Structures are given as structure tokens and as C-alpha cells.
Amino acid sequence: MTSKIISISALAGINARALTAAAVTIALCAAGTPRAAAAGGSADADASAAASAQSDASSVRCDWVGTWATALTTASPFDTNRSQTGFENESIRMIAQTSIGGGLVRIRLSNVYGDRPLTIGHATVARPTAAATGDIDLGTVRPLTFRGRPTVTVPAGSEMVSDPVVLSVQPLGQLAVTVYLPQATGPVSWHWFARQAAFIYAGDHTANPSGGGASMTINSFYFLAGIEVPDDHRADGAVVVLGDSISDGPFQALNANTRWPDFLAQRITREHHGARQLGVLNLALSGNASGHDGDEVGLPELGPSGLNRLGEHVFTQPGVRTVIVELGINDIFQHDDGPDAIIAALQQIVADLHQRHLRVLLGTMVPATGDPSWTPVREATRQAVNRYVRTTRDSDGVVDLDLAVRDPANPAQLNPAFDGGDHVHPTAAGNRAIAEIVPLSRL
């Protein structure tokens, strides 16, 4: 742990007392030591610093909880956004919107869908000064290490979590993660519709505060799977949104964070008045279906079905207590499934989540009348599934997206005030209405 202490001191100028407390906290959280072990963490410090460090660290729980996450998938066969060709001797800077805060942070990088080992030459986390430009605050740049080393090779099919670093993570704030990829990555693990700019640079740009000089800007996330903070006495775990494009927000304004899970995080922070923290992890995938993999329509980047991706996308998240399932409309759009097939898929998803002792809320499907491919038969299927969602005792509650955004005068279509233009996807105002209808007491 010594190298971490020196690195943190040099970057942040933490005083002796705070440094000792930070060292104790990092040591405990990196080792996963129970809270009771905090008392022995600063034997080499002077007595007063040791006492202060023990006091500051005494409430540390060495569990972690997600403050941000995204669902990664396999590369597009059409090399969309360089997902097949990948990167070589380049850096990627990505901006993520947090939900809850903490004094430490660690980053989860994924090569789950790669076909070769992934070499991370360097990586940093920092606070951006302007998300739209990629500029970062130099005073907040924290080099990331992996078991004490700045370079790591992530085997194909695997993930890697960084060592924790001291950085004040603000609720509803932003973090910039920059990774340098010195060797050819091949096909990437990525999230197609980030609605957040990713900045690509030649060479190692990890410690450069300037966002200028990017060779290109892409609207996707690469290799970055999650951002985690300690699950301390204020944290109340995390809620996962397992959804499709209604939650993923592929048509929302770039860098605006106006998906309904973003508004949900804001509402939780506002209504909990800072007394408790509940992370919101948006694991939605545009085009995702409850019972069909994207491969079935030739688009693996749409991800495995909601049922088949629980292990990769939900069960790997730390601190999850509740899952909101917003799926089904693509089973209709892409596969013309009837209500029985969709309900069966949702029932199995709920059962698998309950086996992990997770609370589950099911979401109703939003209206789609007005889309050229929508038919009376498809509408009847939507209505039948929504009746099941509203009345079943299989789940632990309902998020009634349909009620939030439908037109009171014509419930089979979106409220015109909330219609994003394609008669299926809500506007930012519609997303806010969805967030407001979520029953917080059920989370």
C-alpha cells in the first residue's frame, strides 16, 4: 500500500491526519476487511494521527456499491463506431454521470466480449471541467493502479477492478475516465448508444487535462463497465434498470443526461434530502428484448436477451437491492411475440432475480400507436402484457411507464407533449414524468 499513499499525497496534497485516515480506508477497502478490523490500521503513524485515523475509519464498511454502470455487449459486425477494429496506441476519455457520492472510487474495466487479452497501459479518473469538451481538472487527476501496478492485462472474457483511490465523488456529479490502449485491442466490449461523447486521442492522453486534440469524438462507451464507491453508513445500495431503448435514451440530447433513470437519480437525491443514498445503475440496451438475443436479428450489439444477460449485467453489480425490469416492446417490434411468450420471459426474469434475493419492479410498456409498423394485434399484445404487469403478484411492484406518458384522450398513443417524434420514445419531459411515477418506497 505504500506506493498508493505516496501517489495520493503527491497528487492531492492531503495533510498527515487525512492521509493516514485515507490510507487506512484504502487498505481496508482494497482488502475487503470487515469494519471491526479498522482499529489496527495505522500502527506506523504517530499516536495522534493514528487515533484520528481510527476514528475516521471506524465507520468504514468495505463493501462497494455502484454509482454508475452501463451494459456492454459484443462488437457490431458492421464495425459501428470502430467496435470491430478497436484501438491501438490511443486513449479514450469517457464522461460518466454519477448517482451517489463517496470519498473513494474504483473503476471496473471489461474485456468480457474481447477476442484477445486487453492491455491497459495507463488509466486515470478525474473530474471534468466541461463534459462537452473533455477538459478535466488537473488537481483531481488520480492515476489508477491494478494490484499496485499502473499497467494491467485483462484476459478475454474477464473484467478487472482498479485499486481504490481517494477522490471526492459528488452525488449527481461527473467523472472522466481515460484509458490508454498501447496494443491493438481487436473487437471491443462496448455500449453503443452512450449519448455521451467519448474523446479519442493518439498516444497516452491519460494525464493531459486538455480535452483538445481529439482525433475523433464517438457516442459510445468502451471497456468502461462501472464506477463504484464504498457502501458506507449513508448508502442504501443500488437500483438497477434492466431495460431497452426507452431507458437507454438513444434519441436524447448528447451529454444532457435526460434519460428517465437520470431523472430518477435526481429525484432520489432530492427527496431523500441526503440522509440516505441509493445508486441508480442504467443497464438498458437499445433494441433489447426480454426473450430474444440480438443475434437473432443479426445485431449482437443489441445484447443477449434480458433473461440471458442477468449474470453478466446485473449479478456482477455490487450493492444491488432492487431491479426495475422495463422490457417487452422489442419482443413485439422485432419478433411479433404474443403476450404469453413475453409474460413467460418476464416471469422467468423475476424468478431468477428473486433467487438472488433481489426486489423486482416490473415496468409497463409505453404506447406505440403511430409507428408505421404498429398494428391492432401488436397493441392488443401490449395491453395484455400491461394487464399482467399491473395485476401480478409475481413481482414486488410496478413502474407504470404507460400511465406516465400516455395520452389521456387516446391511451393507445403517447401524450403529444411527451412524443419524441417517432411515437414510441418519450422526450426529456416524458422521461421526467416516468421518473416521478416510480414508487420510491418500493425501491
Image (spheres, rainbow, N blue to C red):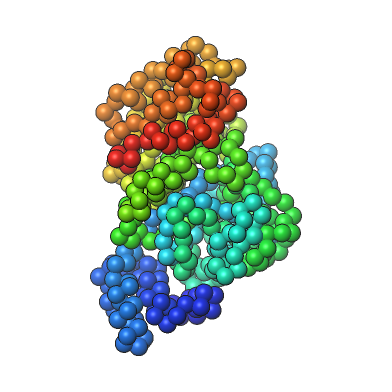
Residue 242 screen position, x and y as percent: 43, 39
Give the total number of marks visible in the rendering: 0
On the image, which quarter does residue 192 sit in?
A: top right
Residue 335 screen position, x and y as percent: 52, 23
Q: Give above or below for 301 relative to 63.
A: above
Towards the viewer: 441 or 246: 441
The residue shown at (46%, 41%) is 263
Q: Give above or below for 190 relative to 150.
A: above
The residue shown at (54%, 79%) is 10
In screen coordinates, is 50 left or right of 342?
left
Residue 96 screen position, x and y as percent: 54, 52
Towards the viewer: 265 or 117: 265
Towards the viewer: 184 or 13: 13
Q: Give above or below for 141 relative to 355.
A: below
In screen coordinates, is 237 left or right of 1?
left
Residue 40 visible, this angle: yes
Towards the viewer: 76 or 130: 130
Residue 368 screen position, x and y as percent: 52, 21
Residue 365 visible, this angle: no
- Residue furthest toward the bottom? 46
Quarter that holds the N terminus: bottom left
The residue shown at (44%, 46%) is 266
